Image (spheres, rainbow, N blue to C red):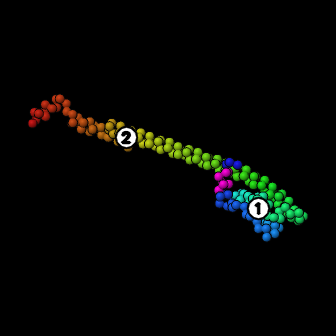
Amino acid sequence: GEPSLARREALKKHNEKAPITLQNLCPIKKYYAAADTVLGQFKHLLKEGDLDGAYIIGRRFALFSTVSLPGHDYYRSPDPDLIKLRLKNQKDAQWVTTGVERIVQVMDKQEIQKQNAELERIRKQKEEQEREKIEWEQKMKQRLTAVELSSRSDRFGVKSDGGEKNLLSKLASLNALFPKEGDEEDDEEEE
């Protein structure tokens, strides 16, 4: 029962009280009747599928039947009616204890399923993050490639939109910046 231990401990912490001490002035038959009421609640919660509630009530019933009731002065009474009530309660306590053990097994399975579902959610989240990272990297590579191609195109006189620039005018402006040796003499003579 380890997978659901934390769940069960939390249920006990918030819902379980120490077994009560019964008053001998109150007839034990009333306590057996109270135990039967709690048993009915346990069965109802089981039927409804409320495992947490059934676990809490089942433990209350078991503690009441095994700790509180035996403390009453008339618990071991030779009265046949009380013997019958005691035996029924003991049988009910065994049935509830077995039920609580089965509840723990189901809780364990539920907790394992929750853990597996959480691991699967985390795995999918990581896959999604990795996919988004790869998509982002691909987009960045495409953008960088486009910028690189654009800058190459500009250097060769091609517009980034793919159209041709006036290559001759660019060459002429470059030639003007770097005149030939013979052109320098002509410039000097004109001055």
Front position in the image: 50 or 82: 82
Q: Which of pointers 1 and 2 indicates the residue nearer the eye?
A: 1
Residue 2 appears in view? yes
Q: Main secondary structure of the magenta part?
A: helix
Disc 2 secondary structure class = helix
Residue 128: assigned label: none
- Magenta stretch: give its range: 4-10
Residue 150: assigned label: 2
Front position in the image: 178 or 166: 178
Counting other residues with Cα less than 10 Å from the Cα at mark 1, is it few (<14), some (14-19), or many (20 or more)? Answer: some
Please give left or right for residue 18 compared with residue 172 in the image. right
Residue 68: assigned label: 1
Q: Residue at x 81, y 64 (%)?
A: 73
Looking at the picture, does residue 140 appear above or below residue 70? Answer: above
Q: Which amino acid type is shown beneath numbered disc 1?
A: Ser
Q: Residue at x 65, y 52 (%)?
A: 6
Looking at the picture, does residue 58 appear above or below residue 108? Answer: below
Please give left or right for residue 88 compared with residue 139 in the image. right
Residue 20 is covered by the magenta coloring = no
